[in-house]
Structures are given as structure tokens and as C-alpha cells.
Amino acid sequence: MSSPEVQMAALLPPELPVLPLLSTVVFPQGVSTLQIGFEKNIKLFRQTGEGGLVVLAGTAVENFEEITGRDISKIGVAARVLRLSEPVSGSLEITLEGLARVNLVEIVQEEPFLAARVSVVFESDGTASQLQMLVEKVLDRAGRLLELDRRYPAEYLHIFNLNAKNPSRLADVAATILHIGIKRKLMVLETVSVRERLERLLKFVEEEIERLEAQAEVAKRVDVNLEKAQKESYLREQLREIKRQLGEEDPQEKEALRLRKTIQKSRLPKNVQSQLLFEVDRLRMLSTASAEYGATRAYIDWVLFLPWAETCEEPGTIEDVERELAARFYALQKQKEKLLEYLAVHRLKKKAKAEVLCFAGPPGTGRTSFGEALAKGLGREFVRVSLGGVEQVSEIVGERRQSLGAQPGKIIQSLSEAGVCNPVVLLEDIDKLGPAPGGRGDIARALLEVLDGVANRHFTDRYLGIPFDLSKVLFLTTADAPENISELLAETIDLVEFPGYVEEEKIEIARNFLVPRKLTEHGLSGTEMVITAAALEKIVRNYTSEAGLGGLEKQIEIICHKCARRRLAGENHWEITEANVEQFLGPPLFLPDVAEATPEVGVATGLAWTASGGDIMLIEALKMRGSGQVISTGSLGEVMKESIQAAHSYVRSKADMLGIDFDEFTNHDIHIHFPSGAVPKDGPSAGITVSLVIASVLANQPIKNDVAMTGEVSLRGKVLPVGGIKEKVSAAHRVGIKTVVMPKQNQKDLEEVPASVRRGMQFEFVEKVDEVFSVAFTNFKPKPQKKLEDLLKKELRKVKKAARQKRNGKKTRRRMAAKKRAVAARSFVRFC
């Protein structure tokens, strides 16, 4: 135990700030100047100041921001700050003098900088003879090292000799001067025993001598007449080695080393690690100015930071998902049940090959929010991927690395965005995949590989070239028009229909969900702005035309904008009513159809399903003299035109029952018109309505104005089921119609219609068109069919009459011919 160490132990404070060192080692009684740029270390020296004491400790962590108390060496050096200056704003230049080795007993502070409780290390000496022998060996081998390496000045040997009487000091000075690497210097510093320190130093010196002798031997064997390229490579290798010895490695080499360490510490699969290490070795040989260097580095980053094994825990249960859906959605009970059943199958048998759910329906009906609610309930990450307009297979499975600007496909990019390998991924608009050069099926086939529960376990993105397991991903899809989905994908997905909301549902959702949310988003409260139910009803009817809620939400947002502005002007309460809603939203954007006021001949109210929900459709018919043609106008599709022909044929077959003369069909044309001619119309559901207006104009029977109807008609007069009952009934209720005629087979669909809509309405379920006549005509009494004998007699009279007319025509033609011959004969006689 030396007296300087005892003095230092008496003067040293129990706790000192700690400065981690990365690229240098300071020994006791050594002086070193350092540049400080890291914010935490700058705070340390601003607080310590000149003359203050700090502890210098080595660390293997290369990033200052990641260094903690566990990452620094347990033995360091207490040092005094000799000089402190700030040559450049944001950095410090400090000069430190090492005082003595200290032991870092405990880290007592992490922020704003490291601090530790320390104690002085008392060195243990060996016997004098042992130390003297080791000192002589160190001086001898150090002299040999100076001879082999011309970088060292000759004065270094003199310095070693001056410290020969102090073995501890000799070991520290030699370790400071010689280029033996940072790690070796740290090992010397951390060795407390002087004898062991000298032995370790001697070992390192011997290793350097062997390396230099081998290098000299190799140099002798190499032909000095190297070509220019070989010479440059040789010199570059020498330069790299020199920088390594000086602790000044090439940035490219340092970056490659950092990447290699990161890869080795990561939890990547072995095949991925091997691929990345190979790419890092390639990176070292490339010029940083080359395009291939940038492409290789980008590839390494993509592969390295993909969530190969990172998963998010799934704390949520099916009950949590059910509560989340109930809190965020009004109605949609069937859709909720379907989602929960699908989730239950996955929970019971995670490896089950189940179909992928496809939320089908118009925009704004809550399809995307359903996916978000599922992810939130399960505690998973949620990512949306839009596939609308995708025209290249590479957008799904990535581009090959050889292509300029190549990158992974949308699927891998979505996983990188999520940061875990088991997110909920919503693939939007799978019905809008664009045409691929090889056909649309190519894109669908690529997407099938993603969605298939077996194939996606080894999904290989072309850019990565490494299989990635997608089986942990919960895929969901959406589509606006399910009939446009590729046949390849249709077999893989399970459709969940999201019908449009009816008026009552929109009002309820707006009152309980949309309005409170928009008030919160705009800094308003429910006491400041009130929207009445009547105002919401008017907004739905006159300012929106959609099946979803997007337009309604936009109109509420406009009202909130105006109220926010008025609030800044000093107002603090607004009540939006049916009377003043136009002050906020302007004139109505849409004028809804209304039912007829009185019964009319040839005008019937049909019910139609549109992309914006249900609507009434007035169908008009007109009889005029002609040749028995049926004219149809109103931008009609082929299916609707065929439905008109079938309806006309059936009415013609029932002419006697309707009291229509058969001559009406041959002597008159019928013009059937569907208003709103600019809007394309198609489908068979107007069959009974068309039959009714044709019978009305031919039989001159008025049609009740408070009856609406829908249903397809067969050639035999059967009324067949149709779709969109919920929307159609709601449209009739909206315009005040009290009676709705529909196919009997659609009776079960009334369960989907809200009770508030069904209340006060009468429903007539029919199986034959004849029943529609009885319900819809104001005063209809079916007439009995004429007997077959009477019909035959009538037809016989017509045949006889036609025969007489034919015979009379022949006699007339013979008289006219004889008269012409007589005239011709007289003319000939006069001429002669």
C-alpha cells in the first residue's frame, strides 16, 4: 500500500460523476485532451468545472445514448479537470489528468449523467526479484517492437527506461504509448496486481511483435512490382490496419462492424442472420459512392428491422371485443355475431384453415371501424392497406432487388409499419384490383398466396428473397361490390354484408355517436351546441344521399366549424332546429321524391334499392293508337327491359279478367317511362309495378297513391323474392306511404326493418300478380274468363268475315281488269 494511494483515499469524495470512454483509455498520472459533444457529458463537465474530479471508465457500448450503469467497467481512473474550454458552440474541449485507480462500488445516479460511489484501489506488489525480471523482459521486448514498427519515435525507449524503477508506472506508460488496441489497454488498466499487469503487457507486446514479424516476412515474399490496382488494394489494407492500431477505424469499416454486432445480438432466425452477414461482407467491399452500396444498405435495413419474431401480447378476450363493438356501433347485430364467431374459431384452433372475412357494403357503413374495434379489443396493432387500383403484381409481392428503386410489397411494408408479426391487417377494396399486364388473375393469385392459411407460412417477398411467416397475421378485407371480386379470391373469403343505414338508424347514430364525437374534436360541449332530432332528420333527407354516414358526418362537422367561430365571437349557446338548419348548411342539396297526392291511371309507386339506400320510383305508362308496340324509356338495362316484356305478356293473358278488349293490344302502343332518365336502372324488382301500370292504362283503372310495391314477375304471373327490403320499406315510410306490397317469400326480411318503421304500416304479401291488382286498384272487380265455346264462335266469325272480304276483293279486281281491256280495244280501233 503506497502513500499516494493512502493520500488519495483520504481526499477522494465518496461519490463522483462518471464519464464513459469509448475510443481512449486514460491511466493514472497520464494527461489526455478530449472533445465532448454528447449532451449528457456536457452537463457533467459544466457542473463539475475546472479543478473538479470525475471518474473515467471504459465501456463496450458504441452508442452513448444506450449506455447505462451496467455497461461500464467496474474499475476506472479518478481524474482532475485541468482545463475546460468551448471552442465550438455545443461542444467542450477538456484536459484531464489521471490520479489513481478507483473501484466503482455502486451506480447511484443515471440522470442527468452517471454517478457512482467509489473507493481507491490499492495495488498488490509481487516480490522484488519477480518484478525486476519482468521489467527487464518488458524493456527488451518493447525495444524489439520499436525496431519493427517505424511509427514509434526512438525516444520512447528512453521514456521506458526512465520508469524502470517503478514497475506499476512502467506498465501504465507502456500501455498508453504502444498501439495494442482499446480492449487490451482496458485489460491492463483493470489489472490490480502489478506482477499480473506486467505479465499481461508482456503478452500483448509479444503478440504485436509476432504480427509485425509475420507482416515483414509476407512483405519480403510479395513481388514489389505490383500492378496499380493491386498496389492500391495493398496500400488500402495497410491504411486500414494503421487506423485500427491508432483507434481511428475507417467509417465504412466501423459501420460494417456495427451492423455485424447488431445482427448477431438480434433475435433473427438463423437463415436470416446468415443472409444479412453475407450482405454486410459485400457492403465492406463496395464504394460508398456506388449505387449498389445504397441498394445493399437499404436491403439490410429492411430485413434487419422487420418484426421476424416480435409479437404483441394479446391480452384481450372475445368479451373485450364484444364490449368494444357494442360501445362503438349501433345495430349491426348480425355482423357483430359473425365476427365474434369467426374469432372464436381462431381461438379454439389457431392453426385452423379458415376463410378470410370480407366486409362488403357501401362506403361509410363502418367496415374499417369494425377492423379497428377488433384490433383494439384484442390488444393488437392495426394496419390498413389500400389495394384499390393496384395494377402490378410487384405491388403485392415486391420487386426484385436488381430493379432500380426496388422495395418490398405492400404486405411486408405493412408489417414493418406495425412493428410486430401478428397485427390485424385490413386489405381495403379487393374488388378494385386494377388490370395486370398478364391479366387480373395474376394479382389475385399473388393475393391468394398472402391470404391462404397454409401458403402464407412461407410467403416470400421478391425483394427480401427470404420466406416470412404470415400465419400469425389476422387478415380482414373490404369490398364495395362483392360481385366484382376475382373468382380466385371469392373461394377464400367469407362475405359479411354491411347494408346501408336507414333514416332512423342514421338519426340515432348521429345523436349518440357522431355529434358527441365532433363536439369533442372541435372543443365544444353538449350544453353549448344542441342539434334537435328534427334538424338531424332534415340534414339526413336534404343534405345527404348515401347509404353510409360519411356525408352526414361532414355536415355535422360544418355546423361545428360555424359554431366554433361564433364562440370566439362571444356566443356560447346554439340550438340547431329544423327551422334554422339552413342558416348553417345553406339551401338543401337534395329534394327527396314524394308520393302522388291522388290516385291516377297509369302511375304506380315502385320501391328501388340504390347505392345511397332505398328510394321510391314513380313508374308511368301511357296508351296511344299504334300497332301494339311496347316502348320503354328511362335509361333501362337489359334485365329491366326483359321484365317489362314478361309483364306485358302476362297482362295480355289476363285481358278478360281485367276487362280489356283484345283489340287494345293490337291497335294501341304502350309507352312505359321511368323518370330520372339520366340515372341508369336495372334489375327485375319492378316487375309487379310494371304489370300494374300496363293493366291500369289498358283497363282504365286508377292506382292507389298510398300503395308502394316491389317484386319480380315470372311469365306465369308468380311474384318472386327480391333484395333490399330494409331500405325499400324505409323509403316508403319516409314519404308517408302506409301500404307496401311485397313477395310472400320476403316476409322473413321484415325482421331487419326497425320496429319504429314497421309501426303504423300495413304489409301485403303476395304470391301472384292477380293479388296485386286487387290491392292496388281503387275499385277492381275481376271479371270471369269467357268460355272456350264463345271464344271459338267469335274467332269463327272473324275468319268468315275475312273470307268474304277476300272474295269481294277478287270480284272487284276482275271487273277492273275487264274494263281496262275494253278501253284498250276501243283506243286501238280509233287508231286504225
Image (tube, grey):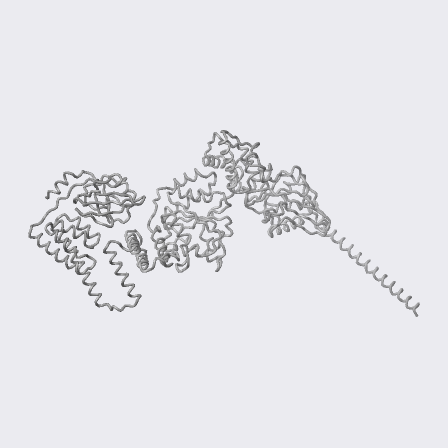
Q: Residue at x 10, y 50 (%)?
A: 165
Side of 522 where 62 appears, left or right: left
Camera sees residue 762 = no
Q: Residue furthest bottom?
A: 832
Residue 281 percent across, percent down from the top left:
30, 59
Whether 764 is drawn above or below 245: the answer is above
Residue 401 is situated, as x and y percent measured from the top left of the image, at 39, 59
Give the vertical position of 146 relative to 61 (above or below).
below
Image x and y of residue 295, in percent? 37, 57
Q: Position of residue 125 (x, y in %)?
A: 10, 48
Figure disc tally = 0
Task: From the viewer's perspective, tell me whether residue 241 is left or right of residue 321.
Answer: left
Closer-to-camera residue (27/395): 27
Using the image as rendered, state which of residue 649 and residue 264 is in the foreground: 264
Residue 205 placement: quadrant: bottom left
Quadrant for residue 806, please give it: bottom right
Is 828 placed left or right of 401 in the picture?
A: right
Location of the C terminus by quadrant is bottom right
Foreground residue, 825 or 586? 586
Quarter containing the N terminus: top left
Q: Quadrant of residue 139?
A: bottom left
x 16%, y 53%: residue: 174
